[in-house]
Image: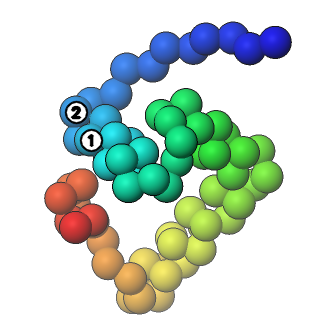
Amino acid sequence: MRSVINISLPLPLTTIVEKEVKRGNYASKSEFFRYLLRLWIEGKLAYDLDQSRKELQNGNGKLLKSLSDLR
């Protein structure tokens, strides 16, 4: 059984999701968010965020000040 959950995103985040779906990385917007939830459940997302924090603390990596820095 499935349940529908509606979310609201700011335009820059919506654009990222739509681009990923258009590139074929995900079959749909729903699949994009299911993937993120699976990562979160597995703890991988938390691990990756922790690794990124450590890189920044060690002077490695790039601090992004806005979404446009991702490009």
The quarter holding residue 31 reads top right
The vertical placement of 35 against 7, above or below, is below
If the image is split into quadrants, where does the N terminus sit?
Answer: top right
Residue at position x 27%, y 65% in the image: 70
Q: Residues within 10 Å of mark 2 (few under 14, many from 20)?
A: few
Is residue 63 shown to the viewer in this render?
yes
The quarter holding residue 54 reads bottom right
What element does badge 1 sit on? Answer: helix
Is 5 on the left or on the right of 71, as rendered?
right
Q: Amino acid at mark 1?
A: Thr
The vertical placement of 38 against 30, above or below, is below
Q: Residue 11's mark?
A: 2
Residue at position x 53%, y 42% in the image: 27
Query: Residue 11 at x, y = what percent?
Result: 22, 33
Q: Residues within 10 Å of mark 1 (few under 14, many from 20)?
A: few
The one nearer the camera, 7 or 59, is 7
Residue at position x 79%, y 52% in the image: 42
Q: Residue 52's mark?
A: none
Query: Residue 7 at x, y = what percent?
Result: 45, 19
Q: Amino acid at mark 2?
A: Leu
Is 29 on the left or on the right of 43, as rendered?
left
Q: Are marks 2 and 1 in contact (CB under 8 Å)?
A: yes
What element does badge 2 sit on? Answer: helix
If the image is split into quadrants, where does the C terminus sit?
Answer: bottom left
The vertical placement of 63 against 66, above or below, is below
Residues at marks 2 and 1, CA–CA distance in whole angstroms? 6 Å
Is residue 46 shown to the viewer in this render?
no
Residue indicated by mark 1: 15
Residue at position x 49%, y 14% in the image: 6
